[in-house]
Image (tube, helix red, strand yellow):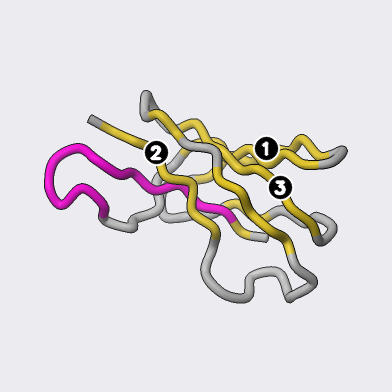
């Protein structure tokens, strides 16, 4: 599964959809992983199908927990899951 970080809030437009740098955390049954990501990049995790919780740390933004579901589909297929981080 692929997970990226985006900022929401702050000055207009409030959401650009641009992937920002930081650390992505993925937790689930017996899983506690983290990956560093650069600007414009997303983290890839190889996990068993199931339900997980993703969060992130990026600067001083407040990042929400995001429920994500891993399926048996190929890694890299489709768009990444996005963790939204609130900025002022």
View extreme (top): residue = 60
Q: Nearer the viewer, mark 3 or mark 1?
A: 3
The residue lying at 53 percent from left, 54 percent from top is 42
Q: Is residue 15 above or below residue 73?
A: above
As drawn, 59 above or below 81: above
| Quarter where residue 50 is shown | bottom right
- Crowd class of label 3 (few under 14; some 14 to 19; many from 20; radius 10 Å): some
**Mark identifier at residue 52:** 3
Q: Position of residue 19 (x, y in %)?
A: 40, 53
Percent across and percent down for residue 47 are: 80, 55
Earlier in the chain: of badge 2 and badge 1, it is 1
User: In the image, residue 35 lies at what x, y percent?
Assistant: 64, 41
Magenta range: 3-15
Discs 3, 1 touching: Cβ within 8 Å: no
Q: Would residue 82 be found to the left or right of residue 14 on screen?
A: right
Q: Kindly report the distance in space between the C-alpha atoms of the residues bearing marks 3 and 1.
A: 13 Å
Q: Which residue is mark 2?
A: 85
Quarter residue 9 falls in: top left
Of circles 2 and 3, the one toward us is: 3
Q: Which type of secondary structure does the marked residue at label 1 adopt?
A: strand
Looking at the rendered structure, the secondary structure element under dot 2 is strand
Residue 29 x/y as whole percent: 84, 41
């Amino acid at each position: 599964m692929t997970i990226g970080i985006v900022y929401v809030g702050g000055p207009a437009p409030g959401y650009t959809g641009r992937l920002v740098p930081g650390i992505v955390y993925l937790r689930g049954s017996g899983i506690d992983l983290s990956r560093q990501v650069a600007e414009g990049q997303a983290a890839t995790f190889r996990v068993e199908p199931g339900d997980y919780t993703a969060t992130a740390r990026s600067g001083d933004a407040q990042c929400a927990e995001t429920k994500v579901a891993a399926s048996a589909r190929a890694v890299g297929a489709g768009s990444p899951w996005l963790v939204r981080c609130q900025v002022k």
